[in-house]
Structure formats: C-alpha cells, structure tokens
Amino acid sequence: MPIFSPPGTPSSSPLSLLQSLLFLSQDLSHYKPFQFPPQKRNSSSILRKSRLLYLLFQDLLQNPTPISLPHSATLCLKEISLLLHKTRSLLHLCTTSSRTWLLLHTHPVSNSFHELVLDLSTILDIFPLSALSLSDDVREQVDLLKKQCARSKPFVDPTDETLRSEILKFIDDVENEIVPDRVRLGAAFKRLGLEGTRSCRDEIRCLEDQIANQNSEKSTAEILSLIGIVRYGKCILFGASTPRANAKQQFPEAEIPFPADFRCPISLELMRDPVVVATGQTYDRENISRWIESGHGTCPKTGQALSRPDLIPNRALKNQIARWCEKRNIPYAKRETRSVTWNKAALEAMKLTASFLVEKLADSPSTEAANRVVHELRVMAKIGADNRACVAEVGAIPRLIPLLGSDDPDLQINAVTTVLNLSILEGNKKRIMDADGSFDAVIHVLRSGATWEAKENAAATVLSLSAETAYRKRFGRDPRVVKGLVDLVRDGPASSKRDGLAAVLNLAGDTETVGRMVEAGVVDVAVESVSEAAEEAAAVLAEVSRKGGAEAVSAMKGTVGILVGVMINGSDRARECAVAALVSVCRKGGNGAVTELVGTPRIERVLLGVMQNGSERARVKAASLGRICRRWVMAQRLDRTVGFTISSA
C-alpha cells in the first residue's frame, strides 16, 4: 500500500516539537469520517485517536512551568510525529482516491490503518506518562487510548466486503458479456454515494487520474474496468450527462481551450513532445510514431509523402506550450508513454454503454434528451482508439449524421464534434463517408453551421477525412467545400481561420482542386490571414504556388512583400513556408515577382539570415531563391550591355 514519506525529522526543541504535534493533530481534525464506504469505520477510529493525542499535546503545552521533557519522552513524541504524518498521508490517499478503487483494495488499506494503530500502541507502551505533569482527565484519556490500541485487530467492514464482491461480480458479468442487473447496480451505486451524473462523473475523473500512478498493466486494467462499470451505470441509472452551455469548459484538460497550434493534428490533444516531420508539420511524437509504424508513408495533415522518417524535436513550440500552461497553472510535464492495454471487461462495458446511448438516439428523443446522449458519445469518442471503435461499431454514425442538420446550436455542435472525434480513427473514415447523407451533412455544417465553432469543427472533420487520398479528391472537387472553407477563413475568428487554412492546405494536394481554389479566392484570403495565422497562410500560398497557382499568387498585389515580412518575423515553420512560396512564385509566376523581390530593401541580408538560422529545408529554399535573384541581376546587366553595344555600333 503506497504511503507518502513524512517530512524531515521533527525539531529536537521540546517546545517546537509539541507545537508541531499540536498543529499536526489539529490538521487531522479537519478530516471528517468518511460518509460512504469504504473505510468508514477505520477512518472514524483513527481520527478519534488523533483527537485524544491532541488533548495530550495541549495539556503539555499549557503546563505553567518551563517545558522540560525526559529524553525518553522526547524520543516517543518524535515517533508520534512521524506516525501522525503517516496517518495524514493515508487519509489523504483515501480522500483523493476513487471510492470504487478503494473498495477493491479494502484489505491492504485496512491493514495500513491497523499498522498505524499497532505502531501507536507500541509507542504508548513505552511512553513515560508517570514522569510528566498531566491533568487527571488527560492521563485517564491516554490510558484509555492505550487500552484501545492494545485491543485493536485488523478490521474489514463486512459492508465493504459485500460491496466489493458486488463490484467484482459486475466486472465479471460484463467480461462474460452478461448485462449487469440494473436493480443490483443501482443499489451498489447508492451505497457508494454515486447517486447522480455529477458524482459518477467525478468518480470517473478520479479513476482516470489514478491511471498515471499505476506501475503495472494489471492495476491499470483494473481501473479501466471500473471506469467502464461506472460510466455504464451512470448512463443507465441517471441518463446521459447534461452538457454545460460552453462545452469547451467541461473537462480538466481534454476540453481546455488550448490554442489550435498546441494540439496534435492526429489526436487533437495537447502535444507533450512535439516533433517536426519531413513535410514541416508538427505532431506529438507518440502519435506520429504510431502512424508511421502502422505502415503509413504520408503526412497525416498534408497527404504528402514523407521523404524521410526523421522526427525533429520542436523545442521552440514545446517551450511555448510550457510557458502558456505555467501562466494558467496547468500542469505540463511529459507523461509516461507506456501503452495502456484495454482488458475485455473494460471493452465490453464500453460497448454496453455505447449501445445503450445509440438505442436512446434511435427512440427519437426530444432535442434536449438527444443533446445529452450525443454529448455523452462525444465524451466517449474524445480519447482513445478503442473508445472510437466501440462507438462506431454499435451504429452511432448513422444516428449522428441527421443531427448535423439540427436547428439547435448545441445539438449540432455536439454532433459534428462527435463525428470529428470518431473520424480520427482510420477505420472510422470509411464508415463516415459511407453513411447516407454524411458528405452533404458535413458540408452543410461547414457552410451554414449555427456557430463558428460548429463550422470550425466541420472544417476539421474535412481535414481528418481527407487524409485518405480518395476522400481528399472528393472534397476538393466539390465547389461547396472550397467555397465554405474560403468563407470560413475570410470571415471567421482566428481559430477558425487556422482550421480552415489547414483543410485548404490538405485539399491543395490535388492540382485540379487548386484551380478551383484560386477561382474561389483562396489566394486573397490566405494573404489577408498572414497576420493572424502566418504558418498556415504561408503554407497554403506555398502549396498553391507549387500546384499551378503561382501566377495568381504573383498577381496578388503586395504578396511578395508580405512573404518577405514572414521570412523576417515569422516562426521557423512560417519562414520555411514563406521562402518555399517565393521560390515557386519566382519560377512560375513571371518576371514581375522576381523584379519585386530583387527590389526589396536588404533582401540579401534576409536570405542570408534564413540560410544561417532556418530549418534544413528553409536553408535549401533560401539558397535557391538567392540563385534566382542573382541570375535575374546578371540577366539585367547582360541586357544593358548588349543594348549599349548595339547602339554604339
């Protein structure tokens, strides 16, 4: 049983030692006996003993004569100090752990309480009470405490043991694909104090937090089983959770509104170890490594082939994320990347929950009820491939698609976000695209969504689905998609611009699509978005120029100067994209672009700076751009020389 190590050795001064003991016992008095199993009786017993010790310390400090304790008494008090620290640590562990997890560990936790009492009994046996000046009442209380400790035996509450057997039976039933009895499940939840969606949601969060502290696959699997049981019980007993008005504020980290650049494009979760791939895109190392190891040879975001498998740490972005989190008191430490194995009980519980929710949707519920159900599915699909697979396998997608056209803004955004979360799993992309009306439904939200957030998540769904080449062409060649993305970038807030530009960039891999994008005004909106989304805008201009839109980029007034500005002030990624765009524009966009570039003040110094400090790809592109400029200058000089020779003749 893990117990926190106590602080350093107590002070040897009798006065400070007693003051420290009084403070510790007062601190323990703030703990209340547990209202629900487990450890209700053991916690009450140890707290009563702590209060009796408080009376002892108080009496010793109130002695009017100068405090002078025998050496043996001082040693005993130091041992009691360590014991109280252990007691506080054990109580803290119990109050911060989930109730179901504590219930499954009833025996080791009960033994920890008993060991504390045994240690206290040993100390009190040798404590020199006769050598101390104590009031009669306190002396009687200490004698009573000694007798209580001497009679103590390990105690496992029969109620706890019965409830523990019930929970284990539920896990066993689910593992064997037996639906738990609803009445028994409700009775067990009531005894645990899980009597509503809020208490169940808190229990699930607590269990999820405990996964990080486990050191074996067995204990992790045990917690996953408990999460599955609690989530299933929450849904069938109390219904789906009622979403708050602002869904983005629902969860501790999964829904914190991190800047879009801080989230991995694969998982949409905060990047703990951002790395850059050959195409210049940034992903979380764990996610992109899994993508590559599964046999993919393309960049998930752009669809471009990865010319090399190198993963270069993006330290600048990691430091930026760390500073952002630090300012907002959000923990940001790289998590252990050990894999979590979902056991059969956890998977079956997840399937039961998802099936129950999908059945509720099939019953044509009211808008409010449907919103709660869809929100619950959204939560389940938020994290983990197994969750996404289970939700899709029980038929959620065909039930979600019609809800994308809902007139209720909350229901629409929960539905499109759930589809987005499900689309992250590779196997779900085909399920979504094959569902009746899904293609048009996603486009409807993109173009006519009730909120910018809904449109933004529809754009992200297009981005996710278009990771498959066939789907990328289908989306890119539909003028409604291109128009919707261009409008989103032009009129939406900064976060929407980034998602819109990311989707545009992904679709721009198809040459035919680029022509349609140019006609729809993508060059204009990309140039206008540089100030708010420099990396994404510069990347779009680079790809459009490379795929046949160089003349359109060159013709846009001021584009060359804006891209030079990005080369000077942009991030490493933005500078790389800007110089790549300029290379394509100067090669394919006509002499006007080269003339404007050469005429830019101190352009040589700008290019030199990129060649010295830019990424490897940026350095190569900057060198190419420098050669283009030098050739143009030499050609101009040659023209002047030839003209002078002819006129002289």
Image: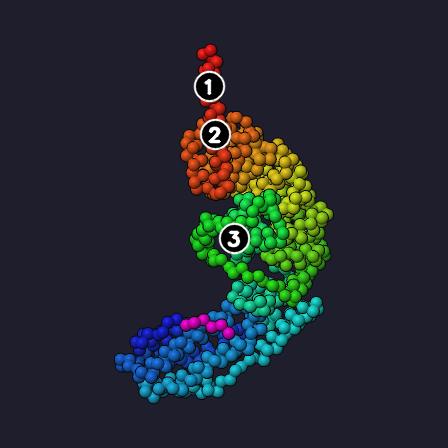
Residue at 47 percent across and 11 percent down: it is 649
The amino acid type of the residue labelled 1 equals: Arg
Is 608 placed left or right of 385 in the picture? left
Looking at the rendering, which quadrant does residue 198 occupy?
A: bottom right
Nearest the viewer among 63 and 480 is 480
What span is in magenta?
Answer: 1-6
Front: mark 3 or 2: 2
Labels 1 and 2: the sequence-earlier one:
2
CA separation in Å, label 1 and label 2 = 17 Å
Percent from the top left, x then y, of residue 162?
61, 77
Residue at 55 percent across and 29 percent down: it is 589
Labels 3 and 1: the sequence-earlier one:
3
Q: Is any part of residue 510 visible from this angle?
A: yes
Q: What mark, if any, has residue 629 been given in the picture?
A: 2
Q: Main secondary structure of the magenta part?
A: loop
Percent from the top left, x then y, of residue 61?
32, 78
* Image height of 156 relative to 336, above or below: below
Percent from the top left, x then y, of residue 203?
56, 65
| Secondary structure of the residue carrying numbered label 2 | helix
Percent from the top left, x then y, of residue 170?
65, 71
* Image height of 254 relative to 162, above or below: above
Residue at 57 percent across and 53 percent down: it is 289
Residue designated by label 1:
640
Nearest the viewer among 296 and 328 is 296
Q: What mark, if any, has residue 271 been given in the picture?
A: 3
Is 92 placed left or right of 56 in the picture? right
Labels 3 and 2: the sequence-earlier one:
3
Task: Pick out the residue farthest to the top.
Answer: 649
The amino acid type of the residue labelled 2 equals: Cys
